[in-house]
Image (spheres, rainbow, N blue to C red):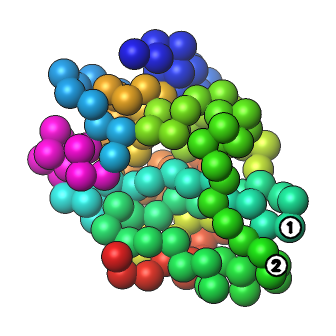
Amino acid sequence: MNMEGVNRVKNFIKEHGVEAEVLEFNETVESVPAASRASGFPPSKILKTLVAIAEGRSYVVILPGDRKLDFGKLSRELSAENVRLAKPDKVEELLNVRPGEVSPFLDEVLKYDIIIDESVRGKGEVLVGGGSTRHLVKVHVDEIVRVLKPCIKDVSKVS
């Protein structure tokens, strides 16, 4: 278990005054289905944090677990032609955590433009990654928006 990642998330929460609770699970929660099973939260209230690459620039994209990234919509929003998800080694290089450990509450995330899918608005309390495969963070969507100051755009489609 990557306690270093969890500690970085906890430090971020403390330093930025985020009203949130770090939850630890006995089983892994690195995917939306696993997080839903372990937490009892529906996939629509488990947010995934992705890294997208568009014409050499990296972006952090946050969307609900019951939706998929719509590359066409993201491409139009970024005015970029070649948009793709970062490969696992690139995610690790950019954020210092492996896929499955990614949290929006990492200092590294703030280095990039952040986009939150508009379908996240109004979801209230949600879960996001917690820095390890056994941790999630329970937080209100408004806190995520307050701290990350993302662009809120329509970049997803139904899974």
Is 80 displayed left or right of 96 in the figure? right
Task: Name which quarter of the figure residue 111 lies in.
Answer: top right
Q: Residue at x 40, y 16 (%)?
A: 1
- Per the model, the C-alpha gap separating discs 1 and 2 is 7 Å
Q: Residue at x 72, y 71 (%)?
A: 83
Q: Which residues are magenta?
A: 32-41
Majority secondary structure in the magenta region:
helix
Q: Residues within 10 Å of mark 1 (few under 14, many from 20)?
A: few
For residue 49, say whether it is visible: yes
Task: Name which quarter of the figure residue 122 lies in.
Answer: bottom left
Mark sitting earlier along the chain (1/2)? 1
Asked whether 85 or 119 is in front, the reply is: 85
Residue 100 at x, y = what percent? 44, 38
**Residue with the mark numbered 1:** 55
Is 138 displayed left or right of 153 in the figure? left
Q: Residue at x 25, y 44 (%)?
A: 35
Of the residues shown, which amino acid type is indicated by label 1? Answer: Glu
Disc 1 vs disc 2: Cβ atoms closer than 8 Å?
yes
**Residue with the mark numbered 2:** 80
Label 2 element class:
loop
For residue 7, say whether it is visible: no
Residue 53 at x, y = what percent? 74, 60
Label 1 element class:
loop
Say above or below: 22 vs 58: above
Residue 88 at x, y = what percent? 60, 42
Of the residues shown, which amino acid type is indicated by label 2? Answer: Ala
Is 70 displayed left or right of 45 in the figure? right
Residue 65 at x, y = what percent? 35, 61
Is 4 magenta? The answer is: no
Asked whether 128 or 52 is in front, the reply is: 52
